[in-house]
Amino acid sequence: MAEQHKKRIATASLAGCFGCHMSLLDIDERILDLIELVEFDRSPLNDLKRFTRRCDIGLIEGGCCNEENVHTLRDFRSNCDVLVAIGQCAVMGGLPVMRNAIMHSDDPLKECFDEAYIDSPYLYNPSHQIPNDPALPLILDKVYTCVDVVRVDYQIPGCPPSGDTLWQTLVALINNRPADLPYELIKYD
Amino acid sequence: MNTPIRFQIDGVEVLAEPGQSIMQAADAAGIYIPRLCDVEGLEPQGSCRVCTVKVNGRTAAACTQPAAADIEVENDTLELTNYRRDLVRMLFHEGNHLCPICEASGRCELQAMGYRLGISQPTKYPYLQPARPVDASHPDIVLDTNRCIRCGRCIRASRDIDGKSVFGYVGRGIDKKVGVNGDNLLATDASIDDCAIALETCPVGCIIQKGMGFYKPIGERSFDHQPIGSNIEGNRSGAAHREETWRQGEE
């Protein structure tokens, strides 16, 4: 039965810190069981940059702070049957969303860049230039959660969700049944 | 000697002293009714509506509604749980509640209510992400109003127990907020020893005592293992009840 349909998983880190991916590795030796149950497609874990084929489960870490994040997220939505937002950044923006506190200003992006590259007292930037290489993805006016951009099937809160939480959720998804998480495993921090 | 009032909560007979609210009678009987703005020792004000129950089929705030003879109160039903989920969700979406960086995380009653009600899945509500100030003027106290849920517990504690009225409501509707009686907190006579500043008074991480940050490690915090309300439910059937509520699917 396992041979007949080995689930394919893709993962991505958008405006996140890779903490959720580290937490996924925190399932320890169960990763050997996981690799029996699934194969990884596009993911930073195997360094595949593009989808090779349609996936059953897409795991998204982080929200969207630049246009590349949006492209990646939409790519995941159109290539994954089930899309799961993992971690507080994906769920509600997380730490990057603190930038949105200044989005009510008349020129929020300028204020953000000035604070990051010009005005900060802890900064060494003698040229007073804001990075503007064409290769850099354009930053968005504010940080968006995954739900703001695409339809998300499930969310796993946590900063990061523990290895146990991710493991139990993945096992449930792989077996097409609801994740039956105990109280201790749902945390917002 | 007053004769006790008899009434029912979810079909269980409960006794109340005359003058008690439904909430007080339920607490005494070991039945937990979720609440945020009500706390023992302060006048109930019935503003958060998380304690909404149905009394003979009509909704009422359990913390302000007096217990009356022979009323039938619904508390732990899917309909009311979904009401409460929506209320708590809206509180989360209305302010800036960044649990990962909040030092109240783990002892926060709003967060604990989210856990207890099993709130984790996507919702239709947008995050409002308001711009709200932080007042760190006082040497011992910080007010991070991003996290304020306007429960008014600090207002009542300062007015009724400390006799200082350091805090008060300002504004109307969505613009309603808790203000201080002065230009900033330093200009008031707030003190670290006030009941209004005590850790148990602010249910979230809005009133923060400086130098206390993250004083309990993860795993030892109030709600790490036990859902909010466990102290009221004790070890009786509450545990099973709780489990059941928690597993009632999202709407």
Image (cartoon, coloured by chain):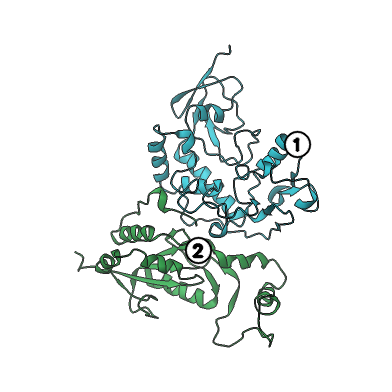
Nearest to the observer: residue A122 or residue B243 = A122
- Residue B221, above or below B33: below
Q: Residue at x 77, y 52 (%)?
A: B186
Provide residue B142's location: percent of width, then percent of height. 68, 54
**Could you tell whether B244 is left or right of A130 in the image?**
left
**Residue A82 in sight from this viewpoint:** no
Q: Nearer the viewer, mark 1 or mark 2?
A: 1
Q: Which chain is cyan?
A: B
| Disc 2 target residue | A147
Which percent across, then down, holds residue B119?
Answer: 47, 50
Residue B163, labelled with which disc?
1
Label 2: how many residues lie within 10 Å, few (<14), some (14-19) or many (20+)? many
Q: Amino acid at mark 2?
A: Val
Residue A159 lies left or right of residue B90; in this view the side is left
Task: Find residue B153 and report its image quarter.
Answer: top right
Chain letter for the part of the structure drawn in green: A
Say above or below: A135 vs B67.
below
Q: Is residue A124 left or right of residue A167?
A: right
Could you say where residue A109 lies in the image, as x and y percent from the top left?
66, 75
Please name the residue shown 72% across and 34% down the image. Answer: B160
Q: Is residue A141 visible?
A: yes
Q: Are marks 1 and 2 in contact (CB under 8 Å)?
A: no
Q: Is residue B224 above or below residue B2?
A: below
Per the rendering, the mark at residue B82 is none
